[in-house]
Amino acid sequence: MTSRGFKATARTSSEARAVARTQTLIKGTNGIGTVRRTTLPGGLRIVTETQPSVRSATFGIWAHVGSRDETPSLNGATHYLEHLLFKGTARRSALDISAALDAVGGEMNAFTAKEYTCYYARVLDTDLPLAIDVVCDMLTGSLILEEDVDVERGAILEEIAMTEDDPGDCVHDLFAHTMFGDSALGRPVLGTVDTVNALTADRIRRFYRKHYDPTHLVVACAGNVDHQKVVRQVRAAFEKASAFRAPQAEPIGPREGRRTVRAAGRMELLGRKTEQAHVVLGMPGLARTDDRRWALGVLNTALGGGMSSRLFQEVREKRGLAYSVYSYTSGFADCGLFGVYAGCRPSQVHDVLQICRDELDQVAEHGLSDDEIARAVGQLQGSTVLGLEDTGALMNRIGKSELCWGEQMSVDDMLARIAAVTADEVRSVARDILGQRPSLSVIGPLKDKQAARLQAAVA
């Protein structure tokens, strides 16, 4: 069962007097797995998934803003703001915020991505009102004081340094830059040392006011919850903040993207004194709304999604050339990436890349066998269900679905879409994606004379 989302339209005078609108998007069995959405008059959406058999609940607020919305000089502002919302409000100090959740054994955190940000707390179901109050207070009542900006700058610079010390992580940022260049999608979510040092409290406050309002927000809650109680508690929490008492407004629709230019045949090498060379070989993928994403998911699973995948078998099991090798996909509003990662000894990097390139070329030309496709379908179905076994994962699913697609899909429908993927669809998407000229990013102790040999991988 798929429930289509909203589309922003001009409102009539009767619509301007509208009250909160509640819809059942997915009707569960005996209330289990029921997903409901309430849209408040000011444009705030609240979605819940009910799981009465658990004793926990996860509450999150998703903001329709990510590093993609930053100008070059603001690179890192979204992530900086994520940190600052934990630093205190008019009602709570930073210690009060953390102590409130610690006192009930709860977990609280946030994450920033290229196209969205999420703040969440996981607690016992009886402590859900506390989680709602604290997270809503953080998001609507943050002070963003000058002294907090200065203190948190040091923590963020340490986070950047930590990422740069992990080449297995850093290489993915390098690959994004290789593919997207100096566009918003090509820049790191954390920002750089220079951009973070240049951000001021005033600029961050302006960024906050521009991107954090009810029409840009989705509240998601999953677990042993009552939808109407969550709505009442969230509405009361938002009404405490005058800046969030929005007039009549419709929520914004899913992001449409900006037709980001994607590169082909590019190579970037970053010299580091590491024991391994870390490589990503990849090409443009699919936007997250592309109907072929289900077939691409099956292809990705068969190629590098598990221990029986082609890349794992050829690179690790048969030859022992790498400990970690896998493929992955990233989908954005208007484009995507397909990549193959491997970490290996520098002396083996050319052999690893050649094997990966040969496998991609072979699948592009000849496709996967029926057995490989059937195994990948089963693996993808199983991992999909197992990945939704806790309330945090459920909250992520319904929150991201509402923000990015404007609709909800039941687990049964997801499994049916995966099962419906045909061998011809997988072979077609393999030709389209893997048949493109790849790009390459490498971090490691590589010498200048190796560049020419590496260039062959993207020729």
Image: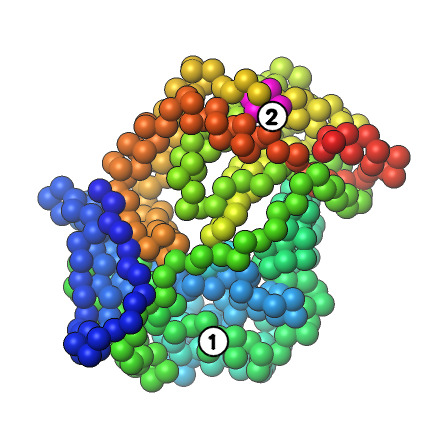
Give percent across and percent down for residue 292. 42, 36
Q: Is residue 106 visible?
A: no
Q: In percent of the image, x 23 and y 59: which residue is there?
A: 37
**Residue depicted at x 61% and y 38%:** 283
Question: Which part of the image, by quadrant, shows the C terminus?
Answer: top right
Q: Is residue 363 magenta?
A: yes
Sequence-first tag of 1 and 2: 1
How dense is the environment of label 2, judged by Cα within 10 Å: few (below 14), some, or many (20 and up)?
A: many
SS for dot 2: helix
Give the number of callouts: 2
Instruction: Kindly identify which numbered label has been placed on residue 3.
Output: none
Residue at the location (24% across, 70% down)?
A: 40
Q: Is residue 277 above or below residue 63?
A: above
Which residue is more in the foreground, 344 or 115? 115
Label 1 amino acid?
Lys
Q: Pick the residue in front: 434 or 353.
A: 434
Residue 317 image position (x, y, % from top left): 60, 18
Residue that carries the numbered disc 1 in the rendered image: 210
Q: What is the magenta range? A: 360-364
| Residue 285: quarter of image | top right
Q: Sort mark 1 into few (<14), some (14-19) or many (20+) by Cα contacts within 10 Å.
A: few
Q: Amino acid at mark 2?
A: Leu
Q: At numbered mark 1, what does the secondary structure look like: helix, strand or loop?
A: helix
Mark 1 vs mark 2, CA separation in Å: 44 Å
Direction from residue 143 to residue 203 in the image, left or right: right
Question: What residue is disc 2 on?
Answer: 360
